Image: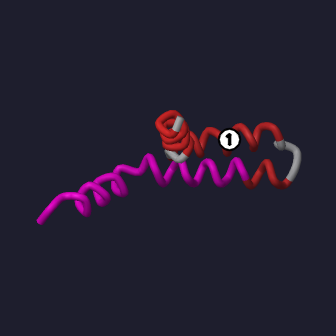
Amino acid sequence: MFFYLSQFLSFLVMPLTIIILLFVGGIIFINKRTGKRLMLCGSVLLLFFSNQFMANYAMYLWEPD
């Protein structure tokens, strides 16, 4: 049971999953202020996590000296 739970939780904390959930929440509440904030938050996170500079910097920090 722990294995299945850990696999499911690891799927939920992936950045793309969080971004998709933010976009879905923004679409559901599109006419409210919350929906617009969710869409903005999803867009900013998408730009941040798809930025090549940030990916290269993270790989640079991960590599041993």
Q: Secondary structure at mark 1?
A: helix
Is residue 5 rendered to the left or right of residue 49? right
Residue 25 pos. (x, y %): 75, 42
Which residue shows up at 83% across the image and 43% down it? 29
| Quadrant housing the C terminus | bottom left
Q: Position of residue 22 (x, y in %)?
A: 67, 45
Q: Is residue 55 magenta?
A: yes
Name the residue furthest front: 1
Q: Amino acid at mark 1?
A: Phe
Residue drawn at 46 percent across, 50 percent down? 49
Q: Is residue 23 above or below residue 55?
A: above
* Tag 1 residue: 23
Q: Position of residue 18 (x, y in %)?
A: 59, 45
- The residue sitting at the bottom extreme is 65
Task: Inspect the magenta stretch and tell me whether residue 33 lies in it.
Answer: no
Q: Give the residue furthest to the left.
A: 65
Q: Which secondary structure class fits the magenta region best?
A: helix
Q: Residue at x 56, y 40 (%)?
A: 17
- Side of 42 where 13 appears, left or right: left
* Residue range (magenta): 38-65
- In this picture the colour scheme is secondary structure
What residue lies at 23% left-to-right and 60% top-to-bottom?
Answer: 60
Report the side of 5 relative to 36 (left or right).
left
Looking at the picture, does residue 33 appear above or below residue 26?
A: below
Q: Is residue 28 left or right of residue 62?
A: right
